[in-house]
Image (cartoon, rainbow, N blue to C red):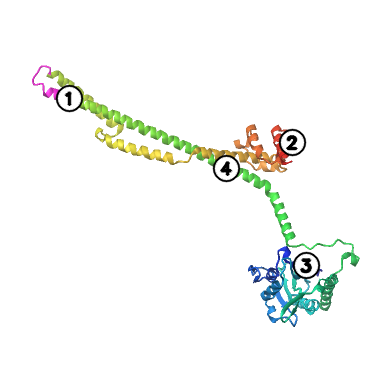
């Protein structure tokens, strides 16, 4: 049903406002303030269903343009604390259509403001939430064909304000009566009307936002135990992934170092065996050369036997070399070069790997944060609900005395007080006492 609201306020520079910005916002338009060069663009504003400027008959016709009108107002005011415009905010009856509201507003604005010499710029806002209302911006100086003159102080009279409030109720009630509606509005206070009920308070945009935020907080509080438990499980999952990565990396690096050791051992053995073969081959050819230079002697038989032994030993060593290293002795140099390249490749891969000590530190941070959340869960009202949703088979669930001593300095004093009271922990009491002594 129809409700009464008619409030009057002043737009003044001392509060950081300008009539140009106010007019652009209420009309949902775009106007540049010629005084400071700022562009006020509210062309995307929703809910502005109608705007109009009504002027006295002797006002310049150019003032029908909103930008010209309010820039002229701003230009007239010289002081940094100037009052540039008056605004009247009115709640419109929901029983009226848009056209009917426009008709009622025009009648009210003409009788109370324009006929007195004010320029009126009004906008109707309706976002469809059963709260249609109008913003009426009024000039505060006398106007003529040449523009604005002196301030008209008679418009600031408090009796004038009461008259404006009463006239809005009369105009609306007459329109409601003509339409056949039973609803009526009254500008008087409840006490003046003889009513004992509590007055309602106008709920503005900020209150609506706060109420919505409170609802969000309630919803978040309802799901907070689940969120905390999920966070703890994610910490544990991240910890396990990192731990597995470290174990895998350590195993891989250990395997690579063993590979380097095997390459080094193989290269040394191949080199040593090839040296032995070279020596045997040299001894055999040396014996053959001695026999060839002996001529015919009885002892030639003995040296032939020695040569046969050397040849047989050399053949056995050659065969053993090929079986052991899968290469022939004449490929030793190529194999040593290949082993050297392989060694360098593996060594470079080890050198390019991340320092596992950094991962160990990150792992410790994961662990401490998980255990911190677990300690904090101990002092929450929904402790059991949280811990019931947390994995129970992890070693992270075991908070040791050392963990406690490391975590508690990072808690808030109020948290350490609760923990100290619950566990009678001397360290927690001391930290809390030192903190509050410092604050005092």
Residue 9 is tagged as: 3
Q: What whole-number distance in Å separates the C-alpha atoms at marks 3 and 2?
A: 54 Å
Residue contact at pointers 4 and 1, CB within 8 angstroms? no
Tell me if residue 309 comes above or below residue 253 in the rendering: above
- Percent across and percent down for residue 285 are 17, 26
Q: How many marks?
A: 4
**Residue span colored magenta:** 284-299
Residue placed under numbered mark 1 in the picture:
286
Q: What is the crowding at mark 3: few (fewer than 14 residues within 10 Å), some, or many (at least 20)?
A: few
Give the CA separation, mark 4 to mark 2. Answer: 32 Å
Is-magenta flag for residue 220?
no
- Asked if marks 4 and 3 touch (Cβ < 8 Å), the reply is no
Q: Is residue 248 above or below residue 122?
A: above
Secondary-structure class at tag 1: helix
- Residue annotated with mark 4: 237
Residue contact at pointers 3 and 1, CB within 8 angstroms = no
> Which marked residue is nearer to the observer: mark 4 or mark 2?
2
Residue 385 sits in which quadrant? top right
Q: Which label number is shown at residue 421?
A: 2
Label 4 vs 1, first from the N-terminus: 4
Left or right, 307 with respect to 214, comes to left
Q: Quadrant of the N terminus?
A: bottom right
Earlier in the chain: of badge 4 and badge 3, it is 3
| Residue 36 percent across, percent down from the top left | 65, 68
The image shows residue 166 at horizontal and vertical percentages of: 85, 72
In the image, 400: left or right of 155? Answer: left
Q: Residue at x 62, y 40 (%)?
A: 370
Residue lying at 41% horizontally and 33% vertically, measured from the top left: 258
Crowd band around label 1 with a 10 angstrom C-alpha radius: few (<14), some (14–19), many (20+): few
């Amino acid at each position: 049903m129809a409700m009464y609201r008619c409030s009057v306020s002043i737009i003044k520079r001392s509060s950081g406002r300008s009539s140009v910005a106010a007019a652009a916002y209420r009309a949902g338009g775009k106007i540049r303030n010629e005084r400071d060069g700022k562009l006020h663009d509210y062309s995307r504003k929703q809910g502005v269903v109608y705007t109009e400027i009504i002027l006295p008959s002797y006002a310049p016709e150019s003032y029908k343009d909103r930008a010209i009108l309010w820039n002229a107002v701003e230009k007239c005011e010289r002081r940094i604390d100037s009052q540039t415009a008056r605004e009247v905010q009115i709640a419109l009856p929901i029983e009226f259509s848009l056209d009917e509201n426009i008709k009622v507003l025009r009648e009210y604005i003409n009788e109370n403001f324009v006929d007195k010499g004010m320029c009126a710029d009004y906008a109707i806002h309706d976002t469809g939430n059963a709260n249609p209302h109008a913003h009426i911006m009024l000039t505060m100086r006398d106007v003529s064909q040449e523009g604005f003159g002196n301030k008209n102080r008679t418009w600031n009279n408090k009796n004038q304000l009461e008259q404006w409030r009463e006239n809005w109720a009369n105009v609306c009630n007459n329109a409601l009566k003509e339409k056949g509606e039973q609803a009526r509005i009254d500008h008087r206070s409840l006490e003046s009307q003889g009513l004992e009920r509590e007055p309602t308070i106008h709920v503005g945009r900020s209150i609506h936002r706060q109420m919505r935020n409170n609802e969000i907080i309630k919803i978040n509080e309802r799901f907070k135990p689940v969120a905390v438990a999920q966070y703890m499980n994610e910490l544990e999952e991240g910890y396990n992934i990192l731990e597995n990565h470290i174990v895998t990396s350590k195993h891989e690096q250990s395997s690579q170092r063993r590979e380097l050791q095997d390459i080094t051992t193989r290269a040394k053995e191949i080199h040593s065996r090839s040296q032995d073969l070279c020596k045997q081959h040299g001894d055999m050819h040396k014996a053959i050369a001695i026999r060839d230079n002996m001529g015919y002697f009885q002892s030639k038989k003995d040296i032939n036997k020695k040569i046969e032994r050397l040849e047989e030993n050399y053949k056995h060593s050659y065969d053993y070399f090929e079986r052991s290293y899968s290469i022939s002795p004449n490929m030793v140099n190529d194999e040593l070069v290949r082993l050297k390249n392989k060694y360098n490749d593996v060594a470079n891969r080890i050198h390019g790997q991340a320092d596992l000590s950094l991962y160990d530190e990150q792992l410790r941070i994961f662990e401490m944060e998980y255990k911190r959340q677990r300690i904090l869960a101990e002092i929450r009202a929904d402790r059991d609900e949280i811990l019931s949703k947390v994995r129970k088979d992890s070693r992270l669930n075991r908070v040791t005395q050392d963990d406690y001593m490391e975590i508690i300095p990072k808690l808030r004093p109020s948290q350490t007080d609760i923990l100290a009271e619950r566990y009678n922990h001397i360290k927690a009491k001391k930290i809390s006492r030192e903190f509050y002594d410092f604050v005092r």
